[in-house]
Amino acid sequence: MNEATIWDEGLSIDRGPIDLQHKQLLALTTTITATAKAGNLAEIHALFLQLSRECRLHFLTEEAYMEQLQYPHREEHRQEHHRLLRHVEGLMEPRVADSPGDTAAVMDCIRSLVLMHILNDDLEIRHFVQEQASA
């Protein structure tokens, strides 16, 4: 599975940096899965650190965007980012380079978490922008 099979324009938030970062996060989960399946477990730790860094950067970008928009649910969304990051990092930590199967399963879970966050939380930002534009 690659990010092209995961990404759909219906997931688009801003058709800009946020969407690009979403695509990059999804692509990185796919890269980690492929790396694990290829048996390159030594690289997994560095890729997990990269995923953590990119999540943090993305959340900062998204939070700045929400602030710029004066999005009314930005504090709740920010809290969701903190919860999600703790959850993702908790999934990665105990299983770093345990086995290809464990790593692939963790990435499937993390990929699902990212997609669910986009669908359940981030799309609300897009809806807010659309409402503001039509008001």
Image (spheres, rainbow, N blue to C red):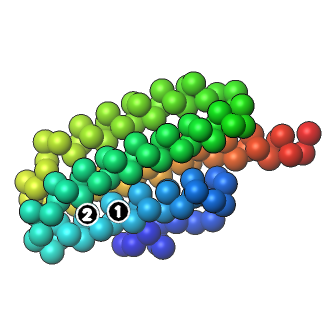
Q: Is residue 107 left or right of residue 63?
A: left
Closer to us: 107 or 81: 81
SS class, disc 1: helix
Q: In which quarter of the image is the N terminus?
A: bottom left
- Residue 16 position, x and y percent, is 63, 59
Q: In this view, does 99 lie above or below 83?
A: below
- Measure the alpha-carbon separation of dots 2 and 1: 6 Å
Instruction: Identify the residue under disc 2.
Output: 32
SS class, disc 2: helix
Closer to us: 129 or 109: 129
- Graded by Cα atoms within 10 Å as few (under 14), some (14 to 19) or many (20 or more), the crowding at tag 1 reads many
Badge number at residue 28: 1
Question: Are the residues tagged 2 and 1 within 8 Å (C-beta)?
Answer: yes
Q: Is residue 128 above or below residue 114?
A: above
- Residue 102 position, x and y percent, is 15, 55
Amino acid type of disc 1? Leu
Q: In this view, does 38 lie to the left or right of 49?
A: left
Residue at (13%, 48%) from the top-left corner?
95
